[in-house]
Image (tube, grey):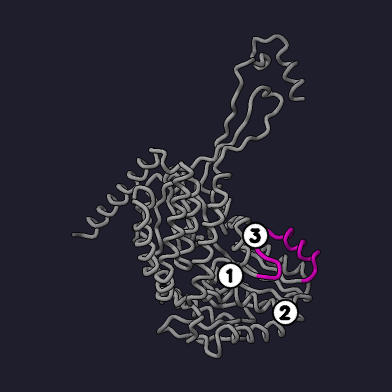
């Protein structure tokens, strides 16, 4: 069989699954709240049952420890399902809203309606969480879904296939493995909604493809997320929490601190404390630590290794190409024009810059693209509020990093080049739902002044609208 013939066969398979899902969706089964809750319960039980397999796969793909696998992937998924299941009945009900006086006699409602057949394309850095977390929202909102996991985390992808096939039919939820050609074949189909997590570059391609069929998209992208450390910050906690957020998964996290701006009088204290925290987290030799992640593949390792030349190595800097590991590394003396500052690092390298006044730091960040996350460390509440109000960013924390993702009451998503749309908790339900506006009008009487044949209709209208 030639490559072309194989690709044509794959397209036919993808098309067949899409058509099956469209037919199943039209039966109305997925709209039943009881069916949605039952499906979420199946997914919850499957995640618990496959927990050892998920952890093992993540170890093989990213050298992720069992602790980190549960903290970043399994635990948040179970918590999300629990939260969504608890509130789903209330979310799915039509909501009565106010009706203006000019529509006297009528009642107004918002009906949340599923989009239909949805496509979820997930990345490799958190290959279980970022595939199944959107799926929770798709199921809760009443959709069918096709999952396309990343081929760069093959062991986790295989576990997801086995787990989903064990609980759902392809006509409802299907997992399709493959490379970029598979993604291209999927994007040719007229899905009712596309949810993508990944790079800005690929996000632009997704949006261009979706524009051809006017398909709504949610894009969870990334960018260079800064951490600002003011003069009055608790340096011990700031260093510990930045270390946790930055070097989790070897820095391969979309909301990891990408660089630090620290008050010039606290730079040396920060560097000393970061060195101490890295040793506490990963020991004297992080390259062999069981708690420290590896770079996903040789391609990304080579890209990151070049960044080590873009400044003075203050901490770390050692690399093991055989096992794709780079130590937690802090760079100083970095130019804003250096390659390491021209793209999201997405690795364990942390450039540190200084500032004299907070306004200087804010002005520097404003020159960059809008980040997915921002972290500010200070005890001054006025300065905290100033930073929140002064800068556009997706979300973030005061005196911590990353933990805003763990609150299902908060939306997660970017702004500008860092993303489009939000999810988590109720926002996931909304993400996969169309809000249908309905007015129910009375037949007991009719307001005549809206009709052109009514005498003095214009005067009546002006009274109502004025």
Tag 1's secondary structure?
loop
Question: Residue 265 sits in which quadrant?
Answer: bottom right
Q: Which residue is drawn at 75% across and 69% down?
A: 360
Front-lying residue, 451 or 288: 288
Location of residue 283 in the rendering, given as x and y in whole percent from the top left corner: 55, 88
Number of residues whose C-alpha sits closer than 10 Å to that of mark 2, classed few (under 14), some (14–19) or many (20 or more): many
The residue under label 2 is 235
Location of residue 302 in the rendering, given as x and y in whole percent from the top left corner: 45, 78
CA distance for labels 1 and 2? 18 Å
Number of residues whose C-alpha sits closer than 10 Å to that of mark 3, classed few (under 14), some (14–19) or many (20 or more): many
Number of residues whose C-alpha sits closer than 10 Å to that of mark 1, classed few (under 14), some (14–19) or many (20 or more): many
* Circles 3 and 1: CB atoms closer than 8 Å: no
Q: Residue at x 40, y 75 (%)?
A: 60
Left or right of 84? Residue 44 is left
Give the numbered dot on residue 256: 1
Q: Which residue is drawn at 72% across and 84% down?
A: 269
Above or below, 147 relative to 448: below
Q: In which quarter of the image is the N terminus?
A: bottom left
Which stretch is magenta? 379-400
Q: Which residue is drawn at 51% across and 87% down?
A: 318
Tag 3's secondary structure?
loop
Left or right of 14? Residue 253 is right
Q: Which of marks 3 and 2 is nearer the N terminus?
A: 2
CA distance for labels 3 and 1? 14 Å
Tag 2's secondary structure?
helix
The residue under label 3 is 393
Q: Does the magenta stretch include residue 242?
A: no
Kindly give the residue lying farthest to the left in the view shown.
1
Above or below, 374 relative to 89: below
Above or below, 327 relative to 52: below
Front-lying residue, 457 or 175: 175
């Amino acid at each position: 069989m030639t490559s072309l013939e194989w690709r044509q066969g794959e397209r036919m398979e993808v098309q067949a699954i899409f058509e099956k899902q469209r037919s199943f969706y039209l039966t109305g089964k997925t709209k039943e709240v009881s069916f949605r809750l039952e499906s979420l319960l199946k997914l919850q039980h499957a995640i618990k049952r496959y927990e050892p397999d998920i952890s093992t796969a993540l170890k093989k793909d990213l050298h992720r420890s069992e602790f980190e696998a549960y903290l970043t992937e399994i635990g948040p998924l179970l918590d999300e399902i629990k939260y969504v299941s608890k509130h789903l009945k209330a979310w799915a009900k039509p909501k009565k809203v106010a009706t203006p006086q000019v529509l006297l006699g009528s009642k107004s409602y918002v009906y949340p309606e599923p989009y239909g057949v949805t496509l979820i394309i997930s990345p490799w850095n958190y290959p279980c969480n970022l595939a199944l977390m959107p799926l929770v929202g798709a199921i809760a909102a009443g959709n069918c879904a096709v999952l396309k996991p990343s081929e760069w985390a093959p062991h986790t992808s295989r576990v997801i296939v086995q787990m989903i096939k064990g609980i759902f039919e392809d006509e409802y939820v299907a997992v399709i493995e493959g490379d970029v050609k598979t993604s291209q074949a999927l994007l040719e189909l007229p899905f009712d909604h596309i949810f993508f997590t990944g790079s800005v570059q690929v996000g632009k391609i997704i949006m261009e493809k979706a524009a051809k069929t006017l398909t709504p998209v949610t894009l969870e992208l990334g960018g260079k997320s800064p951490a600002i450390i003011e003069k009055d910050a608790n340096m011990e906690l700031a260093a510990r929490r930045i270390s946790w957020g930055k070097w989790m998964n070897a820095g391969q996290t979309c909301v990891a601190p990408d660089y630090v701006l620290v008050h010039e009088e606290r730079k040396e204290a920060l560097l000393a404390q970061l060195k101490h925290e890295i040793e506490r987290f990963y020991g004297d030799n992080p390259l062999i630590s069981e708690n420290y992640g590896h770079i996903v593949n040789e391609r990304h390792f080579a890209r990151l290794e070049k960044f080590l030349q873009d400044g003075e190595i203050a901490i770390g800097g050692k690399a093991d190409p055989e096992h794709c590991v780079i130590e937690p590394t802090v760079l100083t003396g970095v130019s804003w024009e250096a390659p390491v500052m021209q793209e999201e690092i997405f690795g364990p390298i942390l450039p540190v810059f200084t500032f004299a006044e907070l306004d200087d730091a804010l002005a520097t960040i404003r020159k960059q693209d809008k980040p997915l996350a921002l972290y500010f460390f200070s005890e001054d509440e006025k300065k905290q509020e100033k930073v929140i109000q002064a800068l556009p960013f997706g979300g973030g924390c005061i005196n911590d990093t990353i933990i805003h993702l763990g609150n299902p009451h908060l939306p997660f998503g970017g702004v500008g080049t860092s993303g489009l749309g939000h999810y988590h908790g109720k926002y996931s339900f909304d993400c996969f739902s169309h809000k249908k506006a309905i007015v129910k009008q009375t037949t007991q009487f009719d307001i005549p002044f809206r009709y052109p044949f009514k005498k003095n209709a214009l005067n009546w209208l002006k009274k109502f609208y004025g």
